[in-house]
Amino acid sequence: MSARLYQEYLENGKLPHMWCPGCGDGIILRAYTEALAELDLAPKDVVSVTGIGCWGKADDYLSTQAFHGTHGRALAFATGIKLGNPDLTVVTLMGDGDAVTIGGNHFIHAARRNIDLTAIVANNYNYGMTGGQYSATTPLDSKTTTSRKGTAEPGFDVCLLAEAAGANFIARTTTYHVGALKNLIKEAITHKGFSLVEVISPCTTYFGRFNGQPSTLSMFNLLKDKAIPIQKYREMSVQEQEKYFAIGTLIKRERPDFYTTYRRINSGSETAGRKE
């Protein structure tokens, strides 16, 4: 059992945080730091990479190494950091805009390459920091500041996108399921290859207010009711599945990560990859 405490990973002098009352980002931050503590990772050996957005502010409160980049480019920077020093534990902290809207192309290719890093995606269904505009994960028909009568575009399923691109580990949970969140982050960090933990955390200030969930309590009750453990979800009919979403470890593969494959191919052997 690690003797470390989660507070060791926080810049306590910068708290309280700037997130809105009821925002799930504080819950995710606590789960992330508890996971690091239980894995007994030294703060100097962890790099938290962020972009722009509400969840992208998380590095302000962390005592780990940190890299704060431009919008949508967190995974590009994280790729360079991990390949530059493979011994580091690299974790990207992204919102849905940073990860799969502005950063969609980087997300696809980081998963395809199977870069050995972890992506914690706080999916709040809109661009919370800039006023509640719809993003690539906003559910169809949902109301936002830029879709007052409902969104005409269907949203990405972030986990299915990662699966199709080739990610090694894919999990989903919510900010209501706090214990599971910490454990899934631990599992993702320790699994070799590109690992995704999607955290469903609808923006309470904009998305919830516009879509019939005006309070944090009502939003948490919705998450509790709509999130179904993956085993039970798979037993449902397609029609039933449309009303819910699966949580838990969805995909776990053992495909060699990019760095391992790169070193094998470029090991110096003149016959590497050559057919005799």
Image (cartoon, helix red, strand yellow):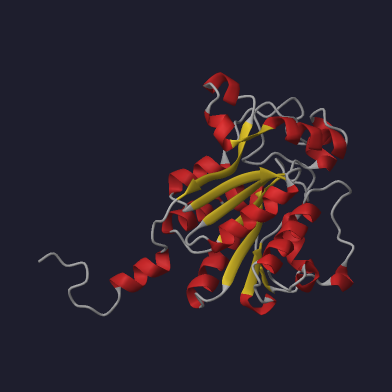
Badge count: 0
Residue that sits furthest to the front in the current view: 1
Residue that sits furthest to the left in the current view: 276
**Residue at the spot x=64%, y=27% of the render?**
152
Q: Is residue 105 above or below residue 48?
A: above
Snapshot quadrant of residue 242: top right
Give the x, y percent position of residue 212.
82, 27
Give the x, y percent position of residue 104.
55, 50
Residue 77 visible in the snapshot:
yes
**Residue at the spot x=82%, y=41% of the render?**
204
Give the x, y percent position of residue 255.
39, 56
Q: Is residue 176 above or below residue 225?
A: below
Q: Is residue 126 above or below residue 166?
A: above
Q: Quadrant of the N terminus?
A: bottom right
**Residue at the spot x=42%, y=59% of the render?**
113
Snapshot quadrant of residue 18: bottom right
Residue 69 visible in the snapshot:
no
Front one among 131 and 16 = 16
Q: Quadrant of the C terminus?
A: bottom left
In-image side of 158 versus 123 (left or right): left
**Residue at the spot x=30%, y=75% of the render?**
266
Q: Is residue 135 above or below residue 57?
A: above
Front one among 153 and 139 = 139
In-image side of 235 versus 1 (left or right): left
Snapshot quadrant of residue 215: top right
In-image side of 187 versus 143 (left or right): left
